[in-house]
Image (cartoon, rainbow, N blue to C red):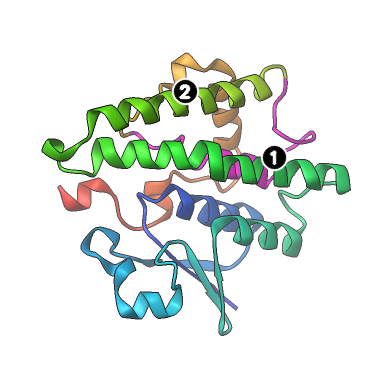
Amino acid sequence: MTIRLHCFGESGNSYKAALTYRLTGLDWEPVFVDFFNGAARSPEFRALNPMGEVPVAEEGGRVLTQSGVMQIEAAERTGRLIWRDEAERAEVLRWLFWDNHKMSSQAGITRFLMNFVPEEKRPAEVIGFMQGRLRAALGTLEGALSGRDWLVGDGPTIADIACCGYLYYPEPYGFDRAEWPAIDAWLDRIAAQPGWAHPYDLMPGNPADRA
């Protein structure tokens, strides 16, 4: 049965789920959520997900929310992008939770404020603060990848797909790949995986559509 992934291209959290589905070989299709015109706040969407967030995955009458849940289930269902033992499982989960709290939260908010809020309403002090927190998270990731190819074990796992969720986007938000050589090489390794696609190619919706 085809998974219907409610998503939009600008959403890094949607990208984590979409790319995981793509790389694990699950049958899925994107369902565009017109986030910037309020679709995620509509009564119809709130009936699907009271949290008012994307991504949302529907399959056979069952609904999943939160990208990490979708990633874990996809890995367990397919045996791909998965840990090899309980120790690696704990490490994968540690990176998923870290990403949610330390990486994606900083990158997502900073990118939104710098690119999707009207220029005259962009809070310079908040953006500066968030960029500092983002650099701290990038430093943690750079250190973890220095001298190794993947975050956990000897191959890519959902930990890598979670932590890269915002790092392929072209909009300026304080991340320059050239400053972070270990992250840069890691992003190239992920992009070399069969089936990889850029978020704007994998899901409908990108800034050019609204230009």
Which of 170/188 is in front?
A: 170
Picture coordinates of residue 5, whole percent (x, y): 48, 67
The N terminus - image quarter = bottom right
Which of 155/164 is in front?
A: 164
Report the magenta stretch's main SS.
loop
Q: Secondary structure at mark 2?
A: helix
Please give the label number shown on residue 209: none
Residue 184 placement, left or right of 119: right
Please give the label number shown on residue 156: 1
Q: Quadrant of residue 198?
A: top left
Residue that appears at 47% across and 23% down:
135
Q: Is residue 82 visible?
A: yes
Position of 110 relative to 70 (above/below): above
The mark closer to the camera, 1 or 2, is 2
> Range of the magenta residues?
148-170
Q: Extreme left residue here?
A: 120
Picture coordinates of residue 199, whole percent (x, y): 42, 47
User: Disc 1, disc 2: CB below 8 Å?
Assistant: no
Residue 89 placement, left or right of 198: right
Q: Which residue is mark 2?
A: 135
**Callout 2 amino acid:** Arg
Q: Quadrant of residue 107?
A: top left
Q: Secondary structure at mark 1?
A: loop
Classify mark 1: residues with Cα within 10 Å, few (<14), some (14-19) or many (20+): many
Q: Please tell me which of labels 1 and 2 falls first in the chain.
A: 2
Residue that appears at 79% across and 35% down:
153
Residue that appears at 28% across and 68% down:
39
Q: Is residue 95 within the magenta segment?
A: no
Picture coordinates of residue 210, whole percent (x, y): 18, 52
Classify mark 2: residues with Cα within 10 Å, few (<14), some (14-19) or many (20+): some
Picture coordinates of residue 171, whole percent (x, y): 31, 34
